[in-house]
Image: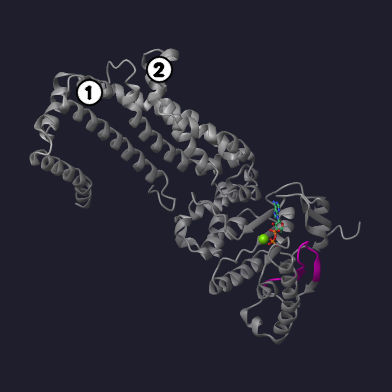
Amino acid sequence: MSRLADALWRLAPFACVVALWYGVKWSGIFSPGLLPAPHEVAIALFERLRYNNFLIDIWLSVQRVLLGLLFGMICAVPVGFLIGWNRRLRRFVDPLINFFRALPPIALIPLVIVYLGIGEIAKVAILFYAAFFAAVIVMYEGMSQISPIYIKVSRTLGATDFEIFTKVIVPLTLPHVLTAARVALGVAWATLVASELVAAQNGIGAVIQNASAFFNLPVIYAGIITIGFFALLMDTLLRAASRRLLSWQDSVEH
Amino acid sequence: MAGTDAKVAFRNVSKSYGAIEVVHDVSFELNEGDFVSLVGPSGCGKTTMMNMLAGFTQPTGGAVLLEGEPVAGPGPDRGVIFQEYGVFPWLTVENNIRFGLNLAVRRDIKKDEKSAIVEKYLALMRLQEFRNAWPKNLSGGMRQRLALARAYAANPHFLLMDEPFGALDAQTRADMHDLLLGIMQAERKTALLITHSVDEAIYLSNRVLVISARPSRIVDDVHIPFPFPRTRDLLDDKEFIALRRRMRDLVMKQYADQLALR
Ligand SMILES: Nc1ncnc2c1ncn2[C@@H]1O[C@H](COP(=O)(O)OP(=O)(O)O)[C@@H](O)[C@H]1O
Ligand SMILES: [Mg+2]
């Protein structure tokens, strides 16, 4: 019963937004053509799913986000690890990484097209870029806060370097990997529409852009809400995984 | 060489960090079964001395000898207890104690033997009820008991403690003193304790070294005559009180000198 109550509480804020949306809609502040009603958006979403293979677009976008995240994390974990352990290296690369992270991915599209063309690789590359720089900063800032006392203690207990790595450093790194993955996932979803600006043929971002060419507001809204839904869903899954894996931590809430 | 049967020997040990000399020409020895305390002002170089014995850092002059050999690095023969406990937050109480036993250096111990060792120290440190708890749910005193249990389970020959009870409240600290005396009675280790508390040093040790302001020198090497086992009644003993007064005066003088350094 409390599980149900919990779920209802989670949905309550969204119900409020929908109510507010109806309120704004019926107040007449916007001319009717400029703001579709929530149920019109729901219908548009349903029709997209039913007649326009929207599931395929969703699947392609989810796939791109996950690939960008995966490759981003594969690079960010070891790189962040090295930077986090080496103070001199950190001081050297910190401004560079912040510079590259600050570049809006959308500004890179012309370059990406020149070097990588307009296929899947180009789109995933943009997501990779965004995910990597977001994750690597979280990784090395987290790593640099790890107290050396645990390593000292393990040495006095007779641990070898390899044992220190597997039994001490890996468990201490895991929370930062999970936080980095959550941040990178959010950034990857935020970058999705930009990445699908590269020769928009399919994907949720492409659907939104095509709809905007026809001023099809219900579909634009449906696309945006779909992105929000999947971003939130994946974040919730990652957060649940963190809570399970990191129950030893003082607080898993970020 | 004289006194090579000493377990630990500091031979004219000096240590400098850059231009600052932290330890100056210190010599002393620990014999088998000794419990020696170092008392001296903050920043005088006590932790540095212990770090050289633990193997975390090397002297810049002289030598720290362990059973006649210079210390090469940290090792499981020397258990270290830190003020910040250092219990592994990602392991349960039981698995913290087991950590040292599961390392490759202990592969010759049988599995049920390991479990028996874990049980023994869970019991000695009164942690059985908390065997599956995360360290985040333990009080400071319990964490330090856990650190002690983990160190003992690795069966070190030496126990090095750097202000282990400094972060605990007075009552918990008193409990820890008696628990430490108890486990020492059950399994004697050759121990070196760093502390600010003259009472703690006298109560636990058979020798107390008073350390000067930086750079560290040994000002006095005091033999503590009270027999073991000791109980808290000792704290009201006339001889104890007189010794404490004499040592406090000496220690206060070192503190004043250290303050003048800044
Ligand atoms: N790694 C280090 N580098 C430079 N100075 C240090 C280092 N470790 C300790 N010191 C200095 O050496 C002095 C003694 O430190 P420490 O041995 O920790 O003193 P204590 O444990 O007696 O309080 C302090 O002034 C401290 O700043
Ligand atoms: Mg110290």
| Residue B40 in view, yes or no | no
The amino acid type, in three-letter code, at marker 2 is: Pro
Q: Residue at x 41, y 44 (%)?
A: A245
Give the numbered dot on residue A55. Answer: 1
Q: Residue at the far bottom: name it.
A: B238
Q: Nearer the viewer, mark 1 or mark 2?
A: 2
* Residue topped by disc 2: A110
Mark earlier in primary sequence (1, 2): 1
The amino acid type, in three-letter code, at marker 1 is: Leu
Q: Chain of mark 1?
A: A
**Horizontal and vertical percent position of residue A129:** 44, 26
Q: Residue at x 53, y 42 (%)?
A: A143
Ligand 1 neighbours mark 2 (CB distance < 8 Å): no
**Horizontal and vertical percent position of residue B212:** 77, 67
Q: Quadrant of the N terminus of chain B?
A: bottom right
Q: Quadrant of residue A194?
A: top left
Q: Residue at x 14, y 33 (%)?
A: A35
Task: Identify the secondary structure beneath mark 2.
Answer: helix
Give the numbered dot on residue A205. Answer: none
The residue lying toward the viewer, choosing from B234 and B131, is B234
